[in-house]
């Protein structure tokens, strides 16, 4: 192999990972696909990330390395994963004759359509 074909690997500073709060909760699905994660697990992981002492380093790493899987720095990195702000999918669905939580257009006036 000629010197021109040898890749130089940039050093990755991953020492911050030892301080991750996720290390204390290996029971949560940090590396699961989004459709295998319950809303409650998602909230639990996001809560741990929120108070994690290495959150900034984790977010920088996930951004710089273009991570596209797993739960990092408060969010799932799969671009198709539901937002934690979207809540559980059933809450946004309108139920026949009842209106779902996603149909809160007239909450203030409570008049609604009769
Ligand atoms: S921010 Fe979240 S995913 Fe990142 S190290 Fe902390 S607990 Fe783990």
Image: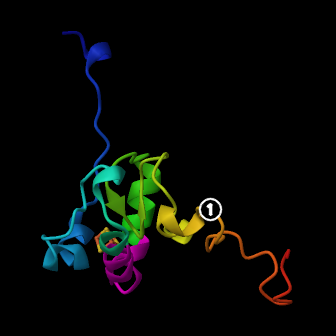
Question: Per the image, is 55 magenta?
Answer: yes
Give the image's coloring scheme.
rainbow
Quadrant the C terminus occupies: bottom right
Q: Nearer the viewer, residue 73 or 108?
A: 108
Quadrant the N terminus occupies: top left
- Residue beneath disc 1: 96
Ligand 1 sits in quadrant: bottom left
Q: Does residue 78 appear in this view?
A: yes
Q: Nearer the viewer, residue 34 or 97?
A: 97
Question: Per the image, is 50 magenta?
Answer: yes
- Give the image location of residue 103, x and y in percent: 70, 70
Please report the residue visible at 86 percent of the width from the left and 89 percent of the height from the top: 109
Magenta extent: 43-56
Using residue 102 as the reference point, say whether residue 4 is left or right of it: left
- Give the image location of residue 26, x and y in percent: 13, 70
Quadrant in the rendering for residue 2? top left
Using residue 109 as the reference point, say whether residue 55 is left or right of it: left
Is 52 located above or below residue 5 in the figure? below
Magenta: main secondary structure equals helix
Q: Does residue 20 appear in this view?
A: no
Quadrant in the rendering for residue 98? bottom right
Please report the residue visible at 16 percent of the width from the left and 74 percent of the height from the top: 23
CA neighbours of label 1 inside 10 A, class few (<14), some (14 to 19), many (20+): few
Please report the residue visible at 41 percent of the width from the left and 82 percent of the height from the top: 50
- Give the image location of residue 56, x and y in percent: 43, 73
Is 93 located above or below residue 101 in the figure? above
Is 92 located above or below residue 5 in the figure? below
């Amino acid at each position: 192999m000629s010197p021109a074909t040898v890749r130089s690997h940039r050093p990755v500073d991953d020492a911050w990972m030892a301080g991750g709060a996720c290390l204390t909760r290996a029971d949560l699905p940090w590396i699961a696909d989004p459709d295998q994660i319950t809303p409650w697990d998602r909230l639990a992981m996001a809560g741990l990330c929120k108070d994690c002492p290495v959150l900034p380093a984790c977010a920088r790493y996930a951004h710089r390395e273009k991570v596209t899987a797993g739960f990092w720095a408060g969010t799932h990195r799969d671009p198709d994963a539901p937002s934690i702000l979207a809540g559980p999918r059933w809450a946004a669905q309108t139920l026949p004759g009842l209106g779902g939580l996603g149909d809160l257009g007239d909450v203030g006036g409570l008049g609604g359509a009769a």
